[in-house]
């Protein structure tokens, strides 16, 4: 699979992303019927990481949804994600280890939105024997040597001396296929990051799934939630690619 070159989203797509996110959230009106139609999980732990300039409040709908499917769901508890700051990696790994201890060293699924998905892949690359799977939502981990995401320059200016160049170097490593199953969910209607940077070559344990929503609204978009639930419901130590249909990503 040849990878397409990343193209920065247009100003129009950027400006309309919050508005389109409001529409994506309205799809949650169908959540009771959605929950009733989905298999419940095995209770395994899930760590959910927020995107840039967001905190655990941005993933509350996703976390509640997965909790109702009987998973043990955790936010990252590190406040607002202000980018790859010094000591952030240590704090995330501490949180990861705490969850492992609480669940008798079970493998953890890590889900991340946007920049949080890059962190999720980093945890998967560091701890492949401890991660069950990684799911990223609109995460631009393939940068073609240059980040074309709108927030990139902003968080470099904001962080100054707090910026962690080591973590950025490691982020380049997560563009490579991980030794754990990965699902990269992306949208060509993403107004924040280039969708081309959110996918990777597909193998028997790495897949890309297209949905039709905004960047901001991806974690509260009913079709995306259905896909996530499908991926999580696979039995322990088994994984197979998502069975796409004509309406995959739409309903």
Image: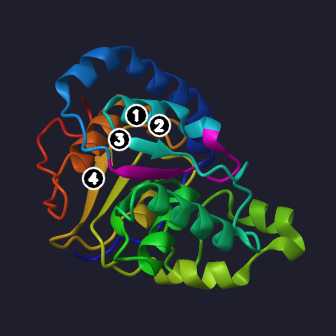
| Mark 3 Cα-neighbour bin, 10 Å: few <14, some 14–19, many ≥20 | many
Mark 2 or mark 3, earlier in chain: 2
| Residue 78 on image: x %, y % | 70, 53
* Residue lying furthest right: 161
Mark 4 or mark 2, earlier in chain: 2
| Mark 2 Cα-neighbour bin, 10 Å: few <14, some 14–19, many ≥20 | many
Q: Secondary structure at mark 1?
A: helix
> Image height check: is 47 above or below 130?
above
> What residue is disc 1 on?
67
Q: Nearer the viewer, residue 217 or 73?
A: 73
Mark 4 or mark 3, earlier in chain: 3
Instruction: Measure the C-alpha gap from mark 2 to mark 3.
Output: 9 Å
Identify the residue at horizontal 71%, vertical 82% (top origin): 165
Give yes or no for residue 48 being in the magenta stretch.
Answer: yes
Q: Is residue 145 visible?
A: no
Identify the residue at horizontal 36%, vertical 70% (top origin): 4
Q: Is residue 178 left or right of residue 125?
A: left
Does the residue at mark 4 contact the one at mark 3 (Cβ under 8 Å)? Answer: no
Q: Is residue 156 visible?
A: yes
Q: Secondary structure at mark 4?
A: strand
| Residue 47 on image: x %, y % | 48, 53
Does the residue at mark 1 contact the one at mark 3 (Cβ under 8 Å)? Answer: yes
| Residue 81 on image: x %, y % | 69, 54
Q: Quadrant of the N terminus?
A: bottom left
> What residue is disc 2 on?
63
Q: Nearer the viewer, residue 193 or 233?
A: 233
Mark identifier at residue 209: 4
> Image height check: is 235 above or below 169?
above
* Magenta-colored span: 44-56
| Residue 39 on image: x %, y % | 18, 34
Instruction: Measure the C-alpha gap from mark 4 to mark 2.
Output: 20 Å
> Image height check: is 51 above or below 226?
below
């Amino acid at each position: 699979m040849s990878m397409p070159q990343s193209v920065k989203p247009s100003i129009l797509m950027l400006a309309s992303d919050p508005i389109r996110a409001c529409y994506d959230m309205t799809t949650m009106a169908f959540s009771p019927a959605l929950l009733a139609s989905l298999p419940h999980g095995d209770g395994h732990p899930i760590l959910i990481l927020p995107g840039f300039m967001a905190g655990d409040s941005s993933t509350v709908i996703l976390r509640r949804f997965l909790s109702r499917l009987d998973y043990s769901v955790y936010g990252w508890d590190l406040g607002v994600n202000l980018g790859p700051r010094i000591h952030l990696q240590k704090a995330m790994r501490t949180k990861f280890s705490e969850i492992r201890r609480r669940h008798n060293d079970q493998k953890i699924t890590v889900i991340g939105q946007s920049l949080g998905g890059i962190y999720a892949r980093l945890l998967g690359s560091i701890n492949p024997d401890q991660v069950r799977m990684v799911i990223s939502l609109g995460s631009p981990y393939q940068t073609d040597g240059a980040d074309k995401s709108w927030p990139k320059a902003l968080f470099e200016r904001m962080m100054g001396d707090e910026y962690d160049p080591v973590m950025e170097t490691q982020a380049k490593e997560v563009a490579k296929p991980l030794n754990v199953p990965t699902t990269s969910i992306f949208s060509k209607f993403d107004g924040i990051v280039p969708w081309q940077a959110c996918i990777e070559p597909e193998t028997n344990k790495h897949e890309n799934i297209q949905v039709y929503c905004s960047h901001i609204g991806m974690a509260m978009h009913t079709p995306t939630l259905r896909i996530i639930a499908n991926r999580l419901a696979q039995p322990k130590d088994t994984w197979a690619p998502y069975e796409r249909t004509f309406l995959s990503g739409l309903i």
